Image (tube, rainbow, N blue to C red):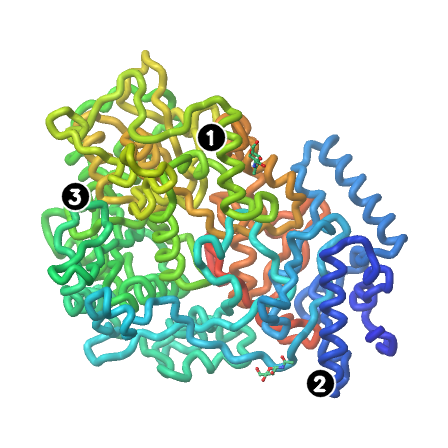
Amino acid sequence: MCEKDEPPAPVSLRKSRLSPRALLGNYLYRRVALWVLLVCLILSALLLKTDVRSKTAKVVGFGGFPGTAPPSPQPPPQGSSPHQKQLDAQRLKKLEQQVKEENKPHWIIYKHLNGYFSGLKSLVSIEDHVPEWPSPDHYTGPVTVVPQSNNSIPTPEPYRPYPDYHSEEYLAKHPPVVECHLDEHGTPVPDIHAFPGVPQPHPDPALGDHKILGIRNDVCFDRFGRYGPYGLGYGTEEGGTGQGMDTEHTGAEAVWADTGKIDYRRVDWGGAQERCVARNAQRFVDTTDTDGGNGKEDQNGIRKIEQRQAVIVRTYVGYRWTPHAILNLRAIISELSLKTGGEYSVHFLLHVKDRNAPIWADRSVVQRILDENVPQEFHSLCTVWSEDQMRLYYPGDFGETFRTPSSQPVHGVYRSAHMPMQVFALQHPEYAHIWNWELDMRYTGSFYELFDRIRSWARDQPRRLLWERSAKYYIPALHGSWEQFSDLVANETEASGRPPIMGPVDFPGRKPLFSETPAHRKSVVPPSCDDDQPPETCGVGEEADIITFNPLFDAESSGWVFSEDVTGYDTHLRIPPRRCAIITASRLSRRLLLAMHEETWRHHHSMFTEMFPATMALHHGLKGVYAPHPVFLDRGWDLGAIERSFNGGRDGSSGGPGSPFDIRNEHNHKGATWYFNAEFSGLLWRRWLGYAQMDGRGDDGGRAGEGELRGGQREEESELSSGRMCLRSMLLHPIKYDNPADKA
Ligand SMILES: *[C@@H]1O[C@H](CO)[C@@H](O)[C@H](O)[C@H]1NC(C)=O
Ligand SMILES: *[C@@H]1O[C@H](CO)[C@@H](O)[C@H](O)[C@H]1NC(C)=O
C-alpha cells in the first residue's frame, strides 16, 4: 500500500487511511473511487518521482486546521473496518430513533458531503471524476481523502460560452455582431475564466442536471476566475473592489493577463449598454408584438434576426449595495448584454416606498433617491415605480380573496410583485421576453450560458405532457435520462386518470381575454400542434411563455401557505385551477405579461406573486416550462428519500397533498443550494468566496452557525488542504450577505 511508510500523522489523517477491505469491498462506487485513487498514487509516484505522501491525499473533513478552529477532540470514525461499520450502524440507529421520538427531520441520518470543499489541487478531468454522491455508500460516511493530482494549480482559461460571432457559419445565418466595450475608450469587456476539470470528488446535483440543458459540467469556477475580471482581488485605488484580497489567491493573476486589472471607477453601465444596442441595431427586430420571439428572416431569407430580451433586477430604496452585490451585477450586465452585442438589456426596477416622494413630478427627486440608494455606475439602468402607481394603473374594486394569510394590500409588492413587471412590459414593446431576477441570487458560472441554454432547452420542449413534466423534480440519479424521466411522467399521468393539460383551461366563471373572444380568436398553440402534425413535435421550437427555476406545481391542497391567495374571482364558485413556482426568478413572455395585464385591469384578477404568472399561462394555454437546473444537497441522501420528499405530492409530482412546498415539508430544502429557506446556499457561497464559515455540522443535525469554523484563508493555504475551492456552475439562493463582514 502506498501509505505504508507514512510517518505518524495527526489523528484526523490516521483515521482516514485506506484499508485493504475498502479496496475489496462490496460497493461498486467506492471500489471504483479507491482504485482510481490508488492508480493515481502509483502513477504520480512513478511519473513525478517525488514523495508520494506530499502529492496524493489530503484530509478534507473534520477539523485540525491550525488557526481556524480548535481541533475536534474526537473526529467521527471513517472507513469501513468492521469496528467502524458497527459504529456507523449504531449511529444510524440512534439517529433514526431520534428522528422518530424527538420529531427531528428525517434527513439528519444522512452524512454531510465533503466533496464541494475540495480545492484546485484536486482537479481531475471529467473522465477521472468520481462524484462523492450519488453513491450507495451514503450511510458509511463521506469521502475524507482527496487525491491531490497536482501540487501546483493549473492555469484557468477564458470561458466563452457564446457563439463564435466571427465564424463563417454564424455569419451565414446571422447579421454581424459588433463588439461592445465598457466605455467610450474601447475598454474590452473581460472574459471570465474557468478551470478545465472538476475537483475530486465534487458531488453531482441531486435535482436537475447540467448536461440535459447544455451547460458544461466538466469545468469549475473559482472566485477569481469568476469575479476577478469584474474587480475582485484588487484594491479600490486600482479601480477594483478591494474584496477577496484577504483570501487565498495563489495564481489569481492569470485572470488579468489579457485585460489587466480593469478600473471600474468611471464605468456607466447604462451608457455602455445603450451604445452596444445602438451599434447592433441591424441585428434586431423592431416590434415584437406579433410573434412569440421566434425570430424572423430578412429579405435574403437566410439571416435570422434576434429578438431582444430584458433582465429586470428588482431592487428597492434602502437596499444595501455591498461590493459583492456590485460584482454580481457587473457580471450580469457584462455577460448578458455587452458580450452578446446587446441581445439582452438589464434594467433595475427600483421600488420607492415613500408615498410622499413626488417621483413623477420632478427629475431631481428621483436623482436624489438614486444618489442615496444606488451606486452611480448603475444609475442609468434604473426605472422607479411605486405601489401608488400600481393603484393608478389598476384602479377599481378587486373583489374578494378566497383566503390570504397576509394583511398586505393587493397592489402591494408582497402579494403582487408582477404588477410593475406588467407595466414595464407595456412600456417596453422592444422586449419579447423579460427575465425576473432578484438581488439575493448568485451564479458560480456564466450567466449567458445559464440563460441561453435554458432558453433554447425550453424552446425545444414539446408541449405534450409539458405541464406534467414541469410539475416534477428531475432526479437524474434515480430517474435516468430525460427520456426515461419523460416516460415515467407519462406513466404516472396515465395511472392518475387525470387528463393531461393541453391548450387553454376551462373552469366555472372563466372570463376570456379580448384575444379569446370569437371576433379575435387566434390560436395560442403553434401550427406544429395542428391535427395533421405528429403529436410529439407540438410546441417544439416554440419559445416558452414562462420558464421557472422550480417546478410548476398544482397549488390546490398543496399546503403552500399562499395557495388560496386568489383575488377577484367569484368566491361562491370553486377556486380556479392554479399553478405556482416558488422563487420569482423566471422568464416571462410579452404575450404572457400582456395577458396578465389585461386580467388585472379588466377582470380585476390577481393572485399571490409566485402563482399569478404560472396560473395565467395555464388558463390561457401558453407554454410553461420548469427548467431543471442543477441543485445540490449538502448531505448524501438516499435516492428514494429524495423522491419521497421532493416529489411526494399527488401522482408522483411536487403538487397537491404531500407537496414539498407544504409549510410542514419545506425543511427538506434546508440543505439545498436553491430554495427560499435554504441554508446550504449561503454557507457554500461564502466558503467558495474564501471566507471561513461554521460548517453547520452539529450533533443535532446541524444548522447554520453550528459546528466548526472551516475554510477561509488559513485553511485554504494549509499544507493539509487541497487549496482554493472550485465549484461547478450552480445557482445559489438565498444569499443574504457575501463577505461575513457585511452581515447585518
Ligand atoms: C500539474 O500541473 C501542471 C501545470 O498546470 C501541468 O503542466 C502538469 O501536467 C500537471 N501534472 C499532472 C500530473 O497533472
Ligand atoms: C412505463 O410504462 C411502460 C408500459 O407499462 C413500461 O414498459 C415502462 O418501463 C414504464 N417506464 C417507466 C420509466 O416507468
Front position in the image: 402 or 632: 632
- Outermost residue toward the front? 532
In the image, is 348 to the left or to the right of 254? left
Amino acid type, label 2: Leu
Please give the label number shown on residue 560.
1
Question: Which element is circle 2 on?
Answer: helix
Which residue is at 53% across, 77% downward?
249
* C-alpha separation, residue under disc 3 versus residue under disc 2: 65 Å
Amino acid type, label 1: Trp
* C-alpha separation, residue under disc 1 versus residue under disc 2: 58 Å
Q: Bin the neighbour count of mark 1 within 10 Å (Cα to Cα): few under 14, some 14-19, many 20 and up.
A: many
Amino acid type, label 3: Leu
Which residue is at 74% across, 51% downward?
137
Which residue is at 16% across, 59% downward?
301
- Outermost residue toward the bottom? 49
Please report whichever mark, 1 or 2, sits nearer to the chain's N-terminal start. 2
Please report whichever mark, 3 or 2, sits nearer to the chain's N-terminal start. 2
Q: Nearer the viewer, mark 3 or mark 2?
A: 2
Q: Whole-percent x and y of residue 55?
A: 71, 79
Which residue is identified by label 2?
A: 47
Ligand 2 under 8 Å from disc 1 Cβ: no
Which residue is identified by label 3?
A: 426
Question: Which element is circle 1 on?
Answer: loop
Question: Which element is circle 3 on?
Answer: helix
Ligand 2 under 8 Å from disc 3 Cβ: no
Asked if marks 1 and 2 touch (Cβ < 8 Å), the reply is no
Q: Bin the neighbour count of mark 3 within 10 Å (Cα to Cα): few under 14, some 14-19, many 20 and up.
A: some
Ligand 1 under 8 Å from disc 2 Cβ: yes
Name the image quarter holding the N terminus.
Answer: bottom right
